Amino acid sequence: MAAKAEAYLERALTVARAQQAKSWELRAAMSLARLWRGQGKRKEARDLLAPVYGCSPKASTRST
């Protein structure tokens, strides 16, 4: 089930980026990052969200 959700969210992210729909890109990225965080993929989640927020993960001062 998680693999199917991941595939749908990755597709949503691709479509949002292609359409330059920033709010939908953020929504899809946050949902995918939340899924990955639940799977223990914290680094991947941070790396996904960093460009959406316009910052680098190394610049973050928040610890996880």
Image (cartoon, grey):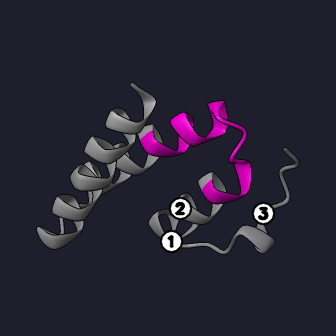
Q: Quadrant of residue 64?
A: top right
Of the numbered discs in the image, which one, if any, rests on residue 51? 1
Q: Amino acid at mark 1?
A: Pro
Span of residues in magenta: 32-44
Q: Which residue is label 3 attached to?
A: 60
Instruction: Residue 12: say if magenta.
Output: no
Tag 3 and tag 2, C-beta contact below 8 Å: no
Mark 2 Cα within 10 Å, few/some/many (few <14, many 20+)?
some
Residue 11: x %, y % from top left: 23, 54
- Amino acid at dot 3: Ser
Hey, what amino acid is under mark 2? Leu
- In the picture, residue 43 is in which quadrant? bottom right
Gap between marks 1 and 2 measured at Cα: 7 Å
Q: Are marks 1 and 2 in contact (CB under 8 Å)?
A: yes
Q: Nearer the viewer, residue 38 or 60?
A: 38
Q: Nearer the viewer, residue 60 or 19?
A: 19
Residue assigned mark 2: 48
Q: Residues within 10 Å of mark 3 (few under 14, many from 20)?
A: few
Q: Residue at x 55, y 36 (%)?
A: 34
| Percent position of residue 21, x then y | 18, 61
- Name the residue: 34% across, 34% down: 5
Quadrant of the rendered image containing residue 47: bottom right
Question: Of the residues under marks 1 and 3, which one precedes in the sequence?
Answer: 1
Q: Is residue 46 left or right of residue 60?
A: left
